[in-house]
Image (cartoon, rainbow, N blue to C red):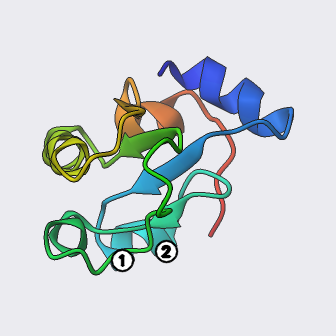
Amino acid sequence: MQLKELSQRIKSKKAPTVVDVRTIFEFRKGHIPGAIHAPTWKIVLRLDQIPSDKNTELVVTCEHGPRAQIATMMLKAFGYRNVVLLAGQMAGWRQAKLPQEK
């Protein structure tokens, strides 16, 4: 999903579930508004807070992409059918000066 599309959907209150797989320290420094924190290792161990509905639209992000790619593969392996990566990841979100929560 493109950064601007996600930003617009957040503003219109029609946002998908954003899954931020970074560390708690990274997440606390700033994250996409409304994002849930689910580090990759918690997804692998199924200790996360991902919605149980396997049709939920999920957008996965990390700082630059590798952790988000692993998490996306895991979520798909667990049966989630509507999972995409955020283009540009959090580095791109900040560079575009889009809003963040702390």
Q: Position of residue 28 (x, y in %)?
A: 49, 74
Instruction: Tell me the distance, in whole angstroms, between the alpha carbons under discs 2 and 1.
Output: 5 Å
Image quadrant assignment for residue 88: top left
Q: Position of residue 41 (x, y in %)?
A: 15, 71
Q: Residue at x 61, y 40 (%)?
A: 16
Q: Residue at x 64, y 53 (%)?
A: 100
Image quadrant assignment for residue 85: top left
Judge whether 90 appears above or below 34 on screen: above
Left-right relation of 27 to 98: left
Judge whether 81 appears above or below 43 on screen: above
Image quadrant assignment for residue 49: bottom left
Q: Residue at x 15, y 46 (%)?
A: 77
| Residue at which label 1 appears | 25
Which numbered circle lies on residue 28?
Answer: 2
Judge whether 52 appears above or below 66 on screen: below
* 80 vs 86, nearest the viewer: 80
Q: Residue at x 74, y 38 (%)?
A: 10
Q: Position of residue 102 (x, y in %)?
A: 62, 70
Helix, strand or loop for disc 2: helix
Q: Amino acid at mark 2?
A: Arg
Q: Amino acid at mark 1?
A: Phe
* 56 vs 35, nearest the viewer: 56
Left-right relation of 7 to 43: right
